[in-house]
Image (cartoon, grey):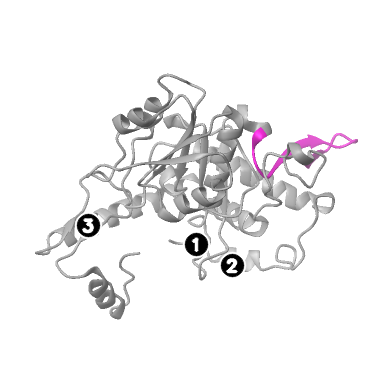
């Protein structure tokens, strides 16, 4: 999507782009303030209470959310919607593989959405959380509210984890408004170009009650000895510090440069700019879907509403269609 051209110029300045990552005690007030602003923007975008100073990318941020849910509830059964991106699911399963945790996948319906009834049928006394991505891997919008209500009918302490797209948050109901306890997502849409698979940016926000269990770093605002506004690393729940074995995560740092880039992007675009990006995504994708479905032999796979991605059933092998599109300079399909 559109990225203001000044961001590339700013982010490559020597003050920001450096081969050396400052250790905690060396982090400048400028860096800390940038992360504080980033946290504030992520909170506003997601409708949650608090956000950390970023994680590595969206999939591991989601796995961290699952770990936090397991640690905070003391339960070991994890439900994941089958419509979550398969890479995210693979990361969750890999992270949990050496732990006494069971990951169960809730199969999606024929319309591409997860059914609240299927969630109710799979909830157990040992269920710690439910992970739902919306828009999901097929671009379909899931009903977070219904699904999270189904999860918590018997035990309100179960953790509702929403995997979100930050651009979609500008147009659709936010994770916070839909009853999510934790929101994890990929920050790449926030002004970060596609660059051969990375690096990208992990977003992580939660309700205030999870503050002391959050992974990574939390930057806070205070005053110095002279009463001037100052920033500090308020929380670092990691094993390298005095918490030792009490650490809630082994995440050792944050994605500082890309968090700064995302902060620049959100500041430059503002709420109206990000919403316009979301609206253009919506309208142009729906126009594309309408035109494709009008071609004989082509049809949308799912009937449910979508945001800006959609799955198409082709009359020929999809690989041939993608190759033909590529020859015309169009990247069709994933």
CA–CA distance between discs 2 and 1? 9 Å
Q: Which residues are magenta?
A: 213-233
The spot of residue 45 in percent (x, y) is: 51, 41
Among the two numbered marks 1 and 3 on one chain, the one whose residue lies closer to the N terminus:
1
Distance between mark 1 and mark 3 Cα atoms? 25 Å
The residue indicated by pointer 3 is 289
Residue beneath label 2, please? 8
Front one among 78 and 303: 78
Mark 3 crowd level (few <14, some 14–19, many ≥20, 10 Å Cα): some
| Quarter where residue 81 is shown | top left
What number is the disc on residue 3? 1
Q: Nearer the viewer, mark 3 or mark 2?
A: 3
Q: Residue at x 78, y 35 (%)?
A: 222
Q: Are marks 2 and 1 in contact (CB under 8 Å)?
A: yes
Residue furthest right in the image:
225
Quadrant where the C terminus is found in the figure: bottom left
């Amino acid at each position: 999507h559109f990225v203001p051209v000044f961001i590339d110029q700013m982010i490559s300045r020597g003050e920001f782009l450096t081969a050396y990552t400052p250790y905690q005690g060396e982090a400048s007030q400028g860096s800390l303030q940038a992360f504080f602003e980033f946290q504030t923007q992520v909170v506003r975008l997601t409708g949650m209470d608090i956000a950390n100073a970023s994680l590595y990318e969206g999939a591991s941020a989601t796995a961290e959310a699952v770990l936090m849910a397991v640690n905070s509830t003391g339960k070991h059964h994890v439900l994941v919607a089958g419509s979550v991106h398969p890479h995210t699911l693979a990361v969750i399963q890999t992270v949990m593989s050496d732990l006494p945790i069971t990951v169960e996948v809730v199969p999606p319906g024929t319309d591409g959405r997860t059914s609240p009834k299927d969630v109710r049928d799979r909830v157990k006394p040992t269920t710690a959380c439910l992970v739902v991505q919306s828009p999901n891997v097929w671009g379909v919008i899931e009903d977070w509210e219904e699904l999270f209500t189904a999860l918590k009918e018997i035990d309100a302490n179960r953790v509702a984890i929403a995997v979100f797209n930050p651009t979609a948050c500008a147009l659709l109901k936010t994770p916070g408004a839909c009853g999510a306890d934790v929101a994890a997502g990929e920050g790449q849409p926030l002004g970060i170009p596609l660059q051969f698979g990375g690096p990208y940016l992990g977003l992580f926000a939660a309700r205030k009650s999870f503050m002391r269990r959050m992974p990574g770093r939390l930057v806070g605002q205070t005053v110095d000895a002279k009463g001037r506004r100052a920033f500090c690393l308020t929380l670092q729940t990691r094993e390298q510090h005095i918490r030792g074995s009490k650490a809630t995560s082994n995440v050792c740092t944050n994605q500082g440069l890309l968090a700064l880039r995302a902060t620049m992007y959100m500041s430059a675009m503002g709420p109206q700019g990000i919403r316009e990006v979301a609206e253009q995504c919506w309208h142009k994708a729906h126009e594309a879907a309408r035109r494709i479905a009008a071609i004989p032999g082509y049809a949308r796979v799912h009937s449910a509403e979508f945001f800006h991605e959609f799955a198409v059933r082709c009359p020929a092998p999809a690989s041939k269609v993608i190759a033909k599109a590529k020859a015309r300079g169009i990247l069709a399909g994933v």
